Structure formats: structure tokens, C-alpha cells
């Protein structure tokens, strides 16, 4: 059966091939943090807009600075003021940080590097010509591309945009992602499970993952395992979402209705079942321009599938230039063996430690698809290819660094 499954690489390519970035909207600076810039931003002005002092001190001509030579102080310029006169040869002007440099001055000497009185100043230490001056446009020149489309708007980017007078920013819309959980055995986290019941960890966990990506999670009420209610829920979800994500109900059990309902609705099946562990019964469909992910119900499978497949897809939808986590090779510090030759790529939860000999990877414990606690310490997913049956201590394995931002 494994040979009939889609490989993880092909599954990701098929998903990303269906993704079109959402349209743009304009938001204020206060609303832009974390969003993806939808268009290049070109500066219409210089930063700084005028040449100014980087220190509290004295504006002088460098030629006039001589040991034991006293210059008269002929004025003062504070930040926010415009100099009333240019600097004449053989004189100095007291200047504050951020104040415009008077015409004729080419150097600022910090206050603490001088001897001075109310109307005179001396320079006991040598000073370089042009010291402590911020030249107009040295940070950003007019017409320069400040930020490229697809950039994630972090605090520094917001500050730069404010500095060039951009108050309304074009960003890509955030997708609305409905998370729908099926299963008669599931109850809410606040409830006490009855016989044969368990608390639903998938919806809150996945919604948290979606929010962390920058998308908008919409949790639906839990759906009982009947075909009619699954059909009604899917139709309602598609009305309010850009993406539908179902958890559970996508396998071939007697009460797994999601796949059949989607087929009856005319959804286009891109693939179903991936040679991936944990999480083989994973499907992807499109219907009327909406994306549908069928995620396995086992909690570790669900979180890993969202990390490996849904996250890159949603980031592409949101217009981000970088969609994939960083990857490094790590040295495994314990033996590991596949339970059997299953033709699947395994994703092992690992905790990483930087050492003198490089990055080391420790398994976080049992790798069963229901052992959700194995995700608590994990800061990486070690990728074991389908044809690798076992790993020995000291073997190198590629690891997706799941706690670091995307870099490619």
C-alpha cells in the first residue's frame, strides 16, 4: 500500500501548486505587525531628511581645531530649531543631538571631549573630520526600495515605514481557517469525559498553530459522526472560510464520512494518503476556490501535518516570501529503528542542543502518534527517509527547526 501513497515532497508540491496569494488590503502601522507586505515600498524622501548632529557638543570647522586654541561660541542650536546663521571661520556653535548642522560646519565634537565655558571652547583631544554627524540620506536615499513585497513586518520594519511617512501599508489578507473536529468520543476541555470519551486537544492545539502563523482560526462546534451532520457542517464551513481543515473522519472506517461527503459535493481530490509517519491518512481537496485539508485525528499526527504541510501553504497564501523553516543536520545521540519497513518518511520529535561538535538531537520520548506530550519539548522534527530502516548513535539526520522563523 505504501507504494500507492503520495510522497511527502510530492504532497507539499501539489499543495503549493494550488495556492494563490490572497488579495491585499491597506492597514495602519498599528495593525501591520507580523503581516506580509503586499507591494514593494519605495522611499519618497531622505532619512535623515537633513544633516544633523549625533551628539550634544559643538559644531566646528575641522580646520579650526587646534590644541590650546580657544574658539568663541557664537550661538546655540537645539533639536527642532533651524540655525539662524552659518558657521564662520574661527568660531563654534553649541549644538544638541538631532539639531540641524549649521552651514559651514563639517565636524561635531562631543561636549565631554572639550574644555568649555559659557562663551568659549577648547579641544584637547584630536577629532576626525566629519565625526558625529548624521548626513542627510545616509540611512535611506530618496527612491530607494526600503522593503520588498513578501517581507514579514517586524517592529524594525514598522519603525522604518514610520520614518519615511508611510502610515497606511498594503498587506496580504489573512486567510480564515475553519477547524472542524469530528468524533462521537470527543468532549470539550472543560468537560469531564464519560465512559469511552476523551477531551478534544486537536481543535485548541491546531487553532493555536494557525494563529501563530498569522492566519485567522475559526473553531466550529464539534461534529457527531453522522453523514448528514458532517455534510451540513462542511457546507457551513465553506461559506465562511478560505480554508477548511477537518480533523478525524478521513480514514476508511465505518464512521469516517469526510472523504465521501467531499466526493459527493464535487470536491477535486488532489491526493489522499501520504507516505508520512505520523499521519498517513491525510488528504487535500479544492472546491469552488476553497482549500480543504483532511487531517488525521491522532493529536501528534494532526500537529505534525499542520506544521509540515499547512503552515507553508498558509504562509504562501498570506504572501510571505519565506515559507519554510530552517533545516540543519544534527547528530543523533541514541539508536532508533523503524518498527517495520513501511516505505514511509518518519518525522521524529527531537530536542536540540548545540555542542562543540555541532548540533545534537535527542528523541523526546515515545514516538507514538497519540503521545502528545512528545511535542512539549520538541524544537525540531528529524526527517528519516523512507528507505532508511534504522539510525545509530552518531548518525547525521536532517532536522526541521520548528521553533525558528522561516528563512527560505
Image (cartoon, rainbow, N blue to C red):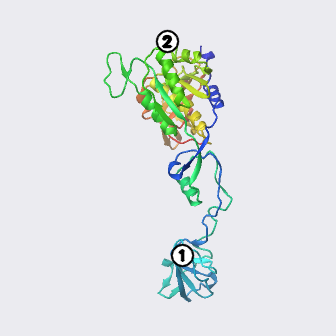
Number of labels in the image equals 2
The image shows residue 209 at horizontal and vertical percentages of 48, 35
For the view shown, which residue lies furthest in the top direction? 254
**Foreground pick, 183 / 393:** 183
**Foreground pick, 59 / 340:** 59
Q: In screen coordinates, is 183 left or right of 52?
A: left
SS category of the residue bearing label 2? loop
With respect to residue 313, does 136 lie above or below? Answer: below
- Any part of residue 278 in sight: no
The image shows residue 153 at horizontal and vertical percentages of 56, 48
Q: Nearer the viewer, mark 1 or mark 2?
A: 1
The image shows residue 278 at horizontal and vertical percentages of 51, 23
Q: Which residue is mark 1?
A: 81
Report the residue at 62% width, 37% height from top.
Answer: 21
Quarter of the C terminus within the rendering? top right
Quarter of the N terminus within the rendering? top right
SS category of the residue bearing label 1? loop
With respect to residue 84, does 219 lie above or below? Answer: above
Q: Which mark is residue 253?
A: 2
**Foreground pick, 50 / 399:** 50
Circle 2 crowding by C-alpha within 10 Å: few under 14, some 14–19, many from 20 = few
Circle 1 crowding by C-alpha within 10 Å: few under 14, some 14–19, many from 20 = few
With respect to residue 297, does 114 lie above or below? Answer: below
Amino acid at each position: 500500500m505504501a507504494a500507492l501513497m503520495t510522497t511527502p515532497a510530492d504532497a507539499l508540491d501539489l499543495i503549493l501548486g494550488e495556492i494563490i496569494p490572497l488579495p491585499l488590503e491597506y492597514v495602519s502601522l498599528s495593525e501591520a505587525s507580523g503581516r506580509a507586505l503586499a507591494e514593494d515600498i519605495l522611499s519618497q524622501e531622505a532619512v535623515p531628511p537633513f544633516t544633523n548632529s549625533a551628539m550634544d557638543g559643538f559644531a566646528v570647522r575641522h580646520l579650526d581645531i587646534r590644541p590650546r586654541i580657544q574658539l568663541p561660541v557664537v550661538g546655540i542650536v537645539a533639536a527642532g530649531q533651524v540655525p539662524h546663521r552659518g558657521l564662520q571661520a574661527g568660531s563654534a556653535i553649541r549644538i544638541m543631538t538631532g539639531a540641524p548642522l549649521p552651514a559651514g560646519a563639517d565636524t561635531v565634537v562631543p561636549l565631554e571631549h572639550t574644555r568649555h565655558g559659557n562663551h568659549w571652547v577648547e579641544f584637547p583631544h584630536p577629532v576626525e573630520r566629519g565625526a558625529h554627524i548624521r548626513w542627510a540620506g545616509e540611512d535611506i536615499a530618496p527612491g530607494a526600495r526600503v522593503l520588498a513585497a513578501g517581507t514579514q513586518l517586524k517592529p524594525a520594519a514598522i519603525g522604518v515605514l514610520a520614518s519615511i511617512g508611510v502610515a497606511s501599508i498594503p498587506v496580504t489578507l489573512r486567510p480564515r481557517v475553519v477547524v472542524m473536529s469530528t468524533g462521537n468520543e470527543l468532549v470539550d476541555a472543560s468537560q469531564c469525559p464519560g465512559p469511552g470519551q476523551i477531551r478534544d486537544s486537536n481543535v485548541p492545539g491546531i487553532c493555536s498553530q494557525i494563529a501563530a502563523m498569522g492566519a485567522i482560526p475559526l473553531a466550529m462546534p464539534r461534529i457527531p459522526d453522522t453523514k448528514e451532520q458532517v455534510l451540513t457542517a462542511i457546507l457551513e464551513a465553506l461559506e465562511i472560510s478560505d480554508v477548511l481543515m477537518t480533523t478525524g473522519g478521513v480514514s476508511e472506517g465505518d464512521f469516517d464520512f469526510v472523504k465521501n461527503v467531499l466526493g459527493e459535493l464535487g470536491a477535486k481530490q488532489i491526493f489522499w494518503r501520504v507516505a508520512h509517519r505520523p499521519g498517513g491518512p491525510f488528504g487535500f481537496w479544492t472546491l469552488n476556490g476553497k482549500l480543504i485539508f483532511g487531517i488525521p485525528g491522532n493529536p501528534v499526527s494532526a500537529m505534525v501535518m499542520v506544521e509540515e504541510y499547512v503552515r507553508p501553504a498558509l504562509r504562501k497564501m498570506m504572501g510571505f516570501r519565506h515559507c519554510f523553516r530552517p533545516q540543519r543536520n544534527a547528530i543523533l545521540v541514541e539508536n532508533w529503528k523503524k518498527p517495520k519497513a513501511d516505505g514511509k518518511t518518519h518525522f521524529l520529535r527531537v530536542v536540540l542542543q548545540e555542542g562543540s561538535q555541532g548540533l545534537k538531537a535527542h528523541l523526546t520520548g515515545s514516538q507514538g502518534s497519540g503521545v502528545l506530550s512528545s511535542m512539549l519539548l520538541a524544537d525540531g522534527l528529524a526527517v528519516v527517509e523512507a528507505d532508511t530502516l534504522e539510525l545509530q548513535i552518531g548518525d547525521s539526520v536532517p532536522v526541521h527547526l520548528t521553533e525558528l522563523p522561516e528563512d527560505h
